[in-house]
Image: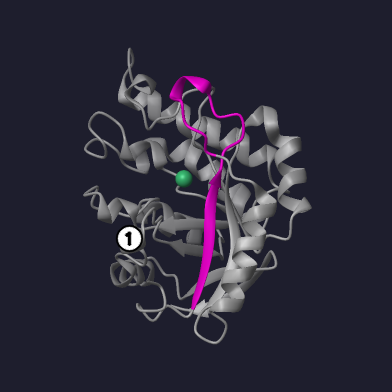
Amino acid sequence: MAVRLGIPRLCVTDHQDFDYPPQYNIDFTFPTDLYFTKLAALREEYRGRIAVFTGVELGLRTHLARQLTEYANGWPFDYVIGSIHLVGDRDPYYPDFFQGRSEEEAYREYFTCTLENVKLHLDAFDALGHLDYAVRYGPCRNKYYSYEKYRDIIDEILKILAEHGKALECNTSGLRSGLGHTNPHPDIIRRFVQLGGEMITIGSDAHSPEQLGYGFQTLKDMLSGCGVSYYTEFHSRKPVFYPL
Ligand SMILES: [Zn+2]
């Protein structure tokens, strides 16, 4: 699919969520050795048509910080996204995360948990994944959501990322799912740039081939409007810059 779309380079970033709570009955992990073997075979098969890179989307959790840091650096990944899919043992994807409290309280808890995880995993990840992930799943989604409302915590997260040379991952899943904006929201991208953030990575958060590269033209226009002129890829965990 990626070859047909004319995509020159592709990085696969499968979910690796260790210790995912048993109540959800899903295994979000993969066998890393097999993953590298398969991707190496694909890289050979498609050589000359598309460059294939090996990445991972690591589910960050405070009690796993040491294990995740060792894991991320113990395998030859090109690119590591650090994402917060769990606050304590609850995933905002499921309604129980929002039950019994205001949506604002729930979002605030998500951002606070993100801040805590970013601080603990600075040696583990290259880019922070979908910073406002929880907003996709709130009862009113983004109706009452704005960057301004959570500015105090979000700014702190962005400053740490910028100071430590970390990237912000921006993906188009929100455009695909009718949220109407990328994750994170363009206001967050704009603020990141203002605070000296230099690296934005892009993705479609594709969970099936048809979703690959979805909304990339809109993404490009949005990023230009936020003052971004280059996007970043990671090859062997080193940033490489490309004009939008
Ligand atoms: Zn994710």
Please tell me in which quadrant of the rendered image residue 162 appears. Answer: bottom right
Residue at disc 1, CB closer than 8 Å to ligand 1? no
Q: State which region is magenta.
A: 9-28
Residue 164 in picture, x, y percent from top left: 68, 54
Q: Which image quadrant: the N terminus?
A: bottom left
Q: Identify the residue shown where x is 23% and y is 52%.
A: 180
Residue 134 in picture, x, y percent from top left: 39, 36
Is residue 174 shown above or below 113? below
Q: Identify the residue shown where x is 25% and y is 28%.
A: 139
> In this view of the protein, which residue sits in the foreground, 144 or 129?
129
Q: Is residue 77 magenta?
A: no
Please tell me in which quadrant of the rendered image residue 36 appears. Answer: bottom right
> Crowding at label 1, few (<14), some or many (≥20) Cα neighbours within 10 Å?
some
Q: Is residue 16 magenta?
A: yes
Residue under numbered circle 1: 211
The residue type indicated by label 1 comes to Gln
Q: Identify the residue shown where x is 35% and y is 51%.
A: 185
